Amino acid sequence: MIAVSKIGSDHVGANKNNQDYFFVSNDEKVKIIMDGCGSGDFSEIGPRLFSLILQEKEEINVENFEEIVKEFFSNLKEAMKMIYKDITNILYNISTFTILAVFEEEERFTVLTCGDGYIITQDQEGFVLFHETKEVIEEDGEEYPKYFVYNYVDKEKLKLYKEAVTFTTHIYPKEKYANVGVATDGLRFWKNLKYLDGEKFIQLLKKGKKGPMSRYINKCNEKYIEENGEMKKQDSAFKDDISIVF
């Protein structure tokens, strides 16, 4: 299994932190990635806190996961009330993050998604596909991604979602799929890769080696690379933060 999180090149240039985070259970049957929203001033805080909470749970499964998420946001909101008079902005700023979670069960992989990202599947023949979860509402030329925190802040944030924000369920039976993982939406820039071999990325996923994958991502973000003895300029393939568990 591979689990890696790297800061995007644009975040380095803007002096921002890595706003992604991930969690993997000890038996590796639960794999979760969280992507902090760039519009939240401190949105890396929420994913890190949530990961710490997950580490304390005796059991995390597809049946109790949404309740764990609700408990986290409810407790965080109450804690903020003890410190701030108006918690709407602070709660939004620290906990606007997407959540994609994979649960390996006996006969299937179940993926729960709330917000943008990618589900990565490898079928029994070894073929790897990337499925984008574009859970966004567009209005007046603006995009409003699906964030669970909308249930706990000013209802103005929730107006585009007529019902409470919940998870979307995706099922992948093991008779067809050998492995399923998730990645944050920073993966979208990888599609624009020009000079580095994109097939290598897929092979690294299959091998599940963190070190080689980290070095590959670093290489993809270099401004100049050597190809056949010639230096060529390239755009960063991972401009946004990228987290992958597979």
Image (spheres, helix red, strand yellow):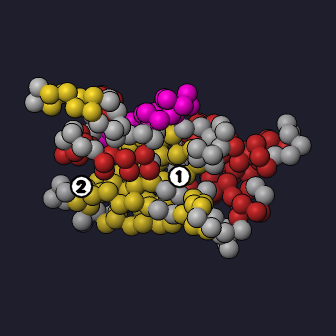
Seen at 44% across and 61% down, the residue is 133
Seen at 78% across and 58% down, the residue is 154
Seen at 79% across and 41% down, the residue is 79
66 or 100: nearer the viewer: 100
Numbered range of the magenta stretch: 1-18
Q: Is residue 43 left or right of residue 156?
A: left
Which of disc 1 and disc 2 is earlier in sequence? 1
Relative to 79, does residue 121 appear above or below in the rendering?
below
**Location of residue 108 (image quadrant):** bottom left
4 or 54: nearer the viewer: 4
Residue 196 visible in the picture: yes
Residue 128: image tag: 2
Q: Mark 2 belongs to which amino acid?
A: Val
Q: Secondary structure at mark 1?
A: strand
Seen at 89% across and 43% down, the residue is 85
Label 2 Cα neighbours within 10 Å, binned few <14 / some 14-19 / many ≥20: some
Q: Position of residue 185 (x, y in %)?
A: 44, 50
Q: Residue furthest right?
A: 85
Q: What residue would you read off at disc 1?
A: 99
Q: Residue furthest bottom?
A: 162
Q: Mark 1 belongs to which amino acid?
A: Ile
Relative to 72, does residue 220 appear above or below in the rendering?
above
Label 1 Cα neighbours within 10 Å, binned few <14 / some 14-19 / many ≥20: many
**Location of residue 42 (image quadrant):** top right
